[in-house]
Image (cartoon, grey):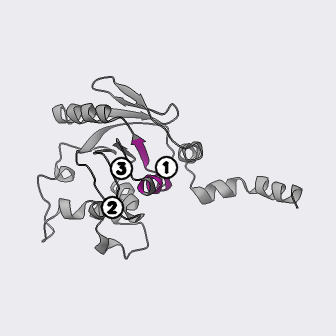
Amino acid sequence: MKQKFNIIRSTCVPLPLENVDTDQIIPARFLKATDKEGFGDNLFRDWRYDKEGRPIPDFVLNDPTYGGCILVAGKNFGSGSSREHAAWAIAGYGFRVVISSFFADIHKNNELNNFVLPVVVSEGFLERLFLSIDHDHQTEVEVDLPHQTVTNMATGESERFDINGYKKHCLMNGLDDIDFLLANKQKTEQWERQNK
């Protein structure tokens, strides 16, 4: 799942629902696993499949006219419990970016820790993006991490988004927290020698 970020341009999967919580993203019955593998298969499990495991045709992830590595979600995405498994499922499915007008803080950090970029946009931008995607399912969005901009390619509308400088560095260099510490091991050891 470790992938360097720079500029991502992709079609989108729209999920215009507010208050999507982590239990809807990955139901609690799947939390026993401690390995990240396979969680993407159960992303939005209870919305994607019926009780017999058959795909529900009108759910967006089962609609072949939508695709891409960007999920566009309604306001307050990732609320509820702090389960990191929700971010594992999003990343495991293949999403690299989630766009919303508001994320629950813990979920937002879990996404960043799993190489998924949460992009916060204004409610107006989000509404117009949903309209663009509804009008043309092949609408593309460009997310430029170096310049911290997101652009609706159908309209040309662009907004700037915020990201913690440390997390931006890690995403752009494909580093998790351990990788970052190991890359700075000599600096840490030098500091320790100088500050005994």
In the rendering, which numbered label is found on residue 95?
3
Cα–Cα span, label 2 and label 3:
16 Å
CB within 8 Å, label 1 to label 2: no
In the rendering, which numbered label is found on residue 22?
2
Specify the segment rendered in magenta: 107-119
Residue positioned 36% across, 72% down in the render: 31
Q: Secondary structure at mark 1?
A: loop
Please identify, in this view, whether the residue under mark 2 or under mark 3 is nearer the observer. Answer: 2
Please state which amino acid type lies under the numbered disc 1. Answer: Gln
Asked whether residue 139 appears in the rendered view, the answer is no
In the rendering, which numbered label is found on residue 3?
1
In the rendered view, tell whether residue 127 sits above or below residue 168: above
Please identify, in this view, whether the residue under mark 1 or under mark 2 is nearer the observer. Answer: 2
Please state which amino acid type lies under the numbered disc 2. Answer: Thr
Whole-percent x, y for residue 43 in the image: 29, 60
Q: Quadrant of the C terminus?
A: bottom right
Residue positioned 50% across, 55% down in the render: 113
